């Protein structure tokens, strides 16, 4: 009960009018940052960090973390409306969110996305409140083999998902791995596949590829199909929120699964992006409506959004309790902590109780504020689809280009974005799936690093992946996922 | 020292932020009428990812400059970590005559060109000032029986090659150079595991996935205070000067030098500032003066103490000479270890 008392004290700190104002300002700024692709939560916080130096540390962290919540909410908006993921963890939201919006159900998709985000975050905060020390210990169990097993599981839960030919899935995935290999190789410290071009040293950024593949690719398709949005008949009133809420409790099991996946990936610094992909893959596999996924099924929005937000929230726990950032945003926040003279680490919970519990209380309140703000704006967002294509499309292209440029301040990235746009168009025309390629691009180098680190530890012996219950269990789960479609097929024949 | 994945800020955002800052600060007190001062926001290049030692220091400096109004224009940190920092240094090298760009260094100023052959060196840039020198400490998990560096080195040499795992940041960078110097003392090989950032490395040691690390003090101090890590020795010829208690029983000064344990390695990491080539002396002087003021703030002093930094400040010829000597040292150490890029 000690936690409850501490939390109540935290609420009393967080609930001052000044802090409440900062919460709303933070969330609003965050939503704007989340909507602009490329300008992620980490950048937003880095830019606004100096604004907070004159505030007391607790107020400052409340505002910054609210920017973070806002960005998590905001990422879903463009994914649903224009098939452009505002943030990497919203990629999986496009798979069903965009088809829904094309069917005129944008309001429904947005409501489901925002509500799921809130539920995911809420569950994660409850976990942080009561299980922080225990959970921090669990995170320490993850060495290189364990990390590899997590990435392996993510890939496996995704393989065999595509409706088309498995060979096409494999081709797309291998292309993603090849792109991920470009740049610096952590294990040998040498440059790879740069062909002497210094510009290629930083590799292909996942965000640039995604903005091109999804955003520009989609615009090219719309141009071919008659220069208009198919979702323009979207209903725009608040009733849609209530109606969607009535449907959501049906998917409680998806919520439970997604929360577990999200919290887990957030604590082991896997992060929100793998969490959203894995959650989508698992939901498709486990749900009785699996065949509907990808055609505009609401569960396909619920699963990735819940997991992404749960992961994004629980990523703050390793930062507070261990001093390691679970995400780039958390890394920037960590810098802020140092400036306020706070030392993140195991003793923060003991030495700076007021700060930590004020932050945790603000997680509850900030998310609530975020939910209220974004839900009231659902009709507004949906109305964007009524603007004629000829006005919105050029705007989207400009925003995409700014986003791609922002990632590394590099002009070359805009050309890469255009190139990926053409690739995206060709993929769609030839019916190649884009998701496996994106997944391989975002997780490829991390999976490779942890695999090779594990091989160094074991001196090349593969049995290291089954050396204890944790890594063995995750690997076995991955293998089951991998061969599940095959087993199903064989059973069907017999 | 994160050489990891990250994202930076665009110039447009820099301007937006500058506008926001100006609005927040109202009228900032003006810097003493120097001959030159920045007329637009200054880009502060960090040739490493977010969250590492260089990144923390750069963001602290940004905060100090903003809080104390040391500069009319704002300082915008931009991470350019591609190619183990080569991306950041190359961008400074290319910005000839641009006085609105500065870069903070870590050892990759020396190690990256030597290990990869990417063409840049300190000679391609204008030296401004040395801010501090970062120390390296040999750490083990507090649950292990090794109380001194000697205990540990004996255990490693008894176990034989590749039995002990050393975790470090990057490959063929400072952490691996130090590992090689330890290998000379133990007469046997470690299994060196490269990770992307110093924070990751410390946590891998807490979780016992590696046996030791050579983290900077700031990267492991939180875990030391919590009693999960134990420092064995510092890679320097004198002990660190800070006598204030960090844990219940020990201060930074109580950590013996590695030389006392038979590892005569003296290695520090430069935290210094450089500018693009072709800038005027007036412009360099502005930044030297700016960093002098930064060093006088309480926030900076506290950061130095928390991270047990060596607070040597240098500028001008003295600094250039130090950098030249440091490059020679890196070339020798990396040549011995076989880390030089093949031409």
Image (cartoon, rainbow, N blue to C red):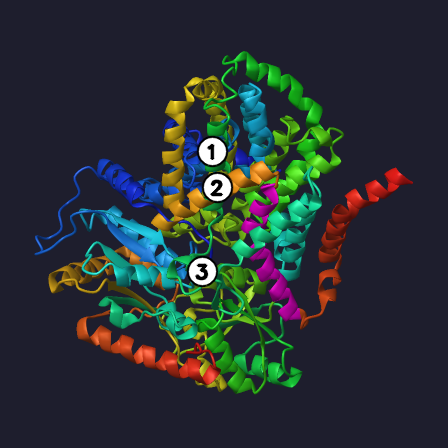
Disc 1 target residue = A220
User: Which label lies toward us, 2 or 3?
Assistant: 2
The answer as to whether the residues below labels 1 and 3 share one chain is no
State the image coordinates of residue B155 (x, y, percent, origin top left): 62, 82
Q: Is residue A456 magenta?
A: yes
Q: Is residue B155 left or right of residue B97?
A: right
Helix, strand or loop at disc 1? helix
| Mark 2 on the same chain as mark 1 | yes
Q: For the residue labelled by badge 3, is the local secondary structure a helix, a strand or a loop?
A: loop
Q: Earlier in the sequence, mark 2 or mark 1?
A: 1
Confirm or deny contact between disc 2 and disc 1 (CB under 8 A): yes
Query: What is the chain identity of the residue bearing mark 1?
Result: A
Name the quadrant containing residue A70. top left
Circle 3 chain: B
Does the magenta run of residues contain A290? no
Vertical position of residue A98 compared to residue B184: above or below: above
Residue range of the region highlighted in magenta in the rendering: A433-457
Image coords of residue B24 (percent x, y) = 25, 37
Q: Position of residue A318 (x, y in %)?
A: 54, 50
**Would you say A416 lies left or right of B98 here?**
right
Q: Work out how far the residue at label 2 is from the one at label 3, CA to CA, in angstroms.
A: 34 Å
Residue A129 visible, this orientation: no
Between A307 and B70, which is closer to the camera in this rendering?
A307
Eyeballing the image, is B108 above or below A70? below
Q: Nearer the viewer, residue B87 or A129?
A: B87
Per the rendering, the mark at residue A422 is 2
Q: Is residue B96 above or below residue A150?
A: below
Residue indicated by mark 3: B2
In which quadrant will I find the N terminus of chain B? Answer: bottom left
Q: Main secondary structure of the magenta part?
A: helix
């Amino acid at each position: 009960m000690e936690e409850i008392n501490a939390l109540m004290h935290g609420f009393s700190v967080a609930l001052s009018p000044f802090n409440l104002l900062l919460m709303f300002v933070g969330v609003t700024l965050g939503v704007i940052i989340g909507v602009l692709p490329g300008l992620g939560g980490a950048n937003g916080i880095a830019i606004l960090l100096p604004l907070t130096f004159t505030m007391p540390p607790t107020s400052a962290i409340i505002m910054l973390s609210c920017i973070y919540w806002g960005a998590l909410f905001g990422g879903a908006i463009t994914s649903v409306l224009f098939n452009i993921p505002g943030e990497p963890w919203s990629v999986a939201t496009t798979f069903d969110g965009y088809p829904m919006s094309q069917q005129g159900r944008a309001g429904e998709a947005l409501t489901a996305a925002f509500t799921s985000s809130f539920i995911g975050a809420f569950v994660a905060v409850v976990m942080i409140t009561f299980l922080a020390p225990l959970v921090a210990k669990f995170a320490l169990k993850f060495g290189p083999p364990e990390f590899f097993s997590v990435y392996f599981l993510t890939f496996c839960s995704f393989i065999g998902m595509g409706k088309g030919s498995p060979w096409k899935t494999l081709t797309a995935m291998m292309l993603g791995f090849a792109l991920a290999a470009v740049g610096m190789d952590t294990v040998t410290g040498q440059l790879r596949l740069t062909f002497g071009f210094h510009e290629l040293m930083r590799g292909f950024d996942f965000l640039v590829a995604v903005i091109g593949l999804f955003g520009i690719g989609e615009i090219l398709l719309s141009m071919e199909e008659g220069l208009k949005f198919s979702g323009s008949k979207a209903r725009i009133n608040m009733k849609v929120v209530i109606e969607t809420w009535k449907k959501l409790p049906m998917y409680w099991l998806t919520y439970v699964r997604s929360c577990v996946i999200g919290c887990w990936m957030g604590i082991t610094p896997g992060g929100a992006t793998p969490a959203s992909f894995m959650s989508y893959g698992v939901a498709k596999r486990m749900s009785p409506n699996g065949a509907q996924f990808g055609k505009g099924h609401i569960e396909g929005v619920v699963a990735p959004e819940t997991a992404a937000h749960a992961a994004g929230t629980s990523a703050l726990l390793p930062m507070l309790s261990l001093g390691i950032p679970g995400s780039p945003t958390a890394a920037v926040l960590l810098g802020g902590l140092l400036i306020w003279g706070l030392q993140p680490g195991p003793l923060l919970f003991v030495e700076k109780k007021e700060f930590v519990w004020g932050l945790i209380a603000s997680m509850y309140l900030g998310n609530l504020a975020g939910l209220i703000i974004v839900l009231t704006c659902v009709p507004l967002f949906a109305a964007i689809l009524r603007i004629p294509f000829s006005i919105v499309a050029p705007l989207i292209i400009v925003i995409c280009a700014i986003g791609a440029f922002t990632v590394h301040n590099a002009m070359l990235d805009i050309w890469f974005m255009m190139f990926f746009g053409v690739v995206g168009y060709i993929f769609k025309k030839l019916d190649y799936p884009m998701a496996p390629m994106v997944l391989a691009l975002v997780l490829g180098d991390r999976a490779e690093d942890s695999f090779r680190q594990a091989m160094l530890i074991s001196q090349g012996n593969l049995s290291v992946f089954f050396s204890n219950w944790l890594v063995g269990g995750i690997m076995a789960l991955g293998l089951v996922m991998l061969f599940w479609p095959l087993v199903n097929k064989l059973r069907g024949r017999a | 020292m994160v050489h990891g994945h990250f994202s930076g800020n665009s110039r447009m955002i820099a301007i937006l932020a500058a506008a926001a800052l100006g609005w927040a600060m109202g009228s900032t007190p003006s810097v003493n009428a120097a001959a030159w001062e920045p007329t637009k926001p200054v880009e502060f290049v960090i040739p490493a990812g977010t969250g590492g030692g260089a990144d923390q220091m750069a963001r602290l400096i940004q905060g100090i400059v903003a809080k104390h109004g040391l500069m009319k224009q704002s300082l915008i940190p931009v991470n350019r970590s591609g190619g183990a920092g080569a991306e950041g240094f190359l961008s400074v090298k290319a910005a000839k005559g641009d006085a609105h760009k500065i870069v903070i260094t870590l050892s990759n100023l020396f190690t990256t060109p030597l290990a990869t052959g990417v063409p840049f060196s300190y000679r391609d840039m204008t030296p401004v000032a040395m801010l501090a020198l970062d120390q390296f400490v040999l750490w083990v998990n507090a649950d292990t029986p090794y109380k001194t560096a000697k205990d540990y080195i004996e255990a490693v040499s008894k176990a034989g090659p590749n039995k002990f795992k050393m975790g470090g940041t990057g490959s063929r960078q400072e952490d691996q150079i130090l590992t090689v110097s330890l290998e000379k003392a133990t007469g046997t090989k470690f299994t060196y595991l490269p990770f992307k950032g110093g924070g990751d490395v410390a946590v891998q040691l807490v979780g016992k996935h590696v046996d030791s690390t050579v983290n900077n003090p700031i990267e492991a101090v939180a875990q030391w205070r919590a009693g999960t890590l134990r420092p064995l020795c510092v890679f320097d010829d004198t002990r660190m000067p800070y006598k204030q208690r960090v844990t219940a029983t020990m201060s930074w000064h109580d950590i013996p030098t590695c030389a006392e344990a038979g590892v005569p390695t003296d290695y520090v990491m430069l935290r210094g500032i450089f500018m693009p080539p072709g800038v005027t002396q007036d412009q360099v002087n502005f930044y030297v003066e700016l960093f002098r003021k930064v060093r006088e703030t309480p926030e900076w002093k506290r950061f130095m103490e928390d991270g047990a930094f060596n607070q040597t400040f240098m500028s001008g010829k003295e600094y250039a000479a130090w950098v030249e000597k440091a490059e020679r040292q890196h070339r020798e150490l990396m040549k011995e270890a076989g880390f030089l890029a093949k031409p």
